[in-house]
Amino acid sequence: MSSANSKLLEQIIGASRSAGEAIMEIYATDFDVAKKSDASPVTAADEKAEAVILKALATIAPDIPVISEEAASAGHIPDVGNRFWLVDPLDGTKEFISKNGEFTVNIALIENHKPVLGVVLAPALNRMFAGSVGDGAFIEDAAGRRPIKCRKTPAEGLTVVSSRSHGDAAALDAFLAGRKVASSVNAGSSLKLCLIAAGEADMYPRLGRTMEWDIAAGHAVLSAAGGFVKTLEGKELGYGKDGLDNPHFVATGAD
């Protein structure tokens, strides 16, 4: 990993861990749940984690603008050029509320519409995925830090990962028709992309609405591990789109 990217990634890992600590403090309490204007849930953990991350990014890279979910939901979206941060301070709020542990802190750097560096931290699971495109990806957990990469699809077929809290089963079945599927697993938040990056799954079709901050960090990790995120038409998914919402897409491992 280049020294510049290595230093930046370690700084972003530090910011994500600080946000994770703030989240876990609230996770241990009987927190309240409010509704945003789009009726999606929000907690004090979302807001506190975002404040921690924005403060850290202002120190780490004050010249790079930030698009972050809670600020964007409140209408605060800065003008961005070809380089900006995409932040989801607490991805998987429904998982956080249900206390199943499958929620993450997501921080990604976008350059020329592509995610080039990202960190996905699951603080309740003590699992962190990180990577820089061109330099590789790694996981850090109780066993320490080790590199990860996508696998080739096993002869017995695909392991397909799908959302725990969202999704259309009929649409997924139709998409997978004709493909050799060995097993399916559910996961919350951007962990779905990271499971492919770690060689634990092979495909994640997302046939529903997502926002750019939902998947950018996981996309960066997956790209660093040799995987892809493409639209259903086969085009590489890009960032900085009008409205910041994504089309349907499919994430896959190595070709």
Image (cartoon, rainbow, N blue to C red):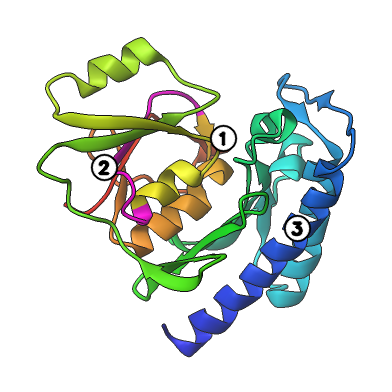
- Indicate yes or no whether the magenta region holds residue 207: yes
Indicate the position of residue 66 as horizontal and vertical percent values.
Answer: 67, 57
**Residue extending farthest top:** 170
Q: Can residue 6 be seen?
A: yes
- Quadrant of the rendered structure where residue 250 is? top left
Tell us which disc is closer to us: 3 or 1.
3
Please report the residue visible at 85 percent of the width from the left and 45 percent of the height from the top: 26
Dot placed on the residue nearer the N-terminal end, 1 or 2: 2
Magenta stretch? Answer: 197-209
**Label 1 amino acid?**
Gly
Which numbered disc, 3 or 2, marks the residue closer to the eye?
A: 3
Q: Which residue is mark 3?
A: 19
- Please, what is the three-letter code of the amino acid marked with disc 2? Lys
Question: Does residue 210 appear to the left or right of 158 in the view shown?
Answer: right
**Residue occupying the point 43% across, 51% down:** 194
Q: Measure how far apart labels 3 and 2 are at the Cα level.
A: 33 Å
* In the image: residue 235, left or right of residue 223: left
From the top left corner, tell me how far across and down residue 14 is, in percent. 68, 71
Q: Secondary structure at mark 3?
A: helix
Residue that appears at 51% across and 32% down:
210
Contact? badges 3 and 2 (CB < 8 Å): no
Q: Position of residue 8 (x, y in %)?
A: 58, 78
Image coordinates for residue 202, horizontal then vertical, percent: 27, 43
User: Which residue is painted at 63% across and 42% down in the image?
Assistant: 103
* Disc number lying in front (1 or 2): 2
Contact between marks 1 and 2 (CB within 8 A): the answer is no
Residue annotated with mark 1: 243
Q: Earlier in the sequence, mark 3 or mark 2?
A: 3
| Image quarter of residue 92 | top right
**Amino acid type assigned to the residue bearing label 3 in the image:** Ala
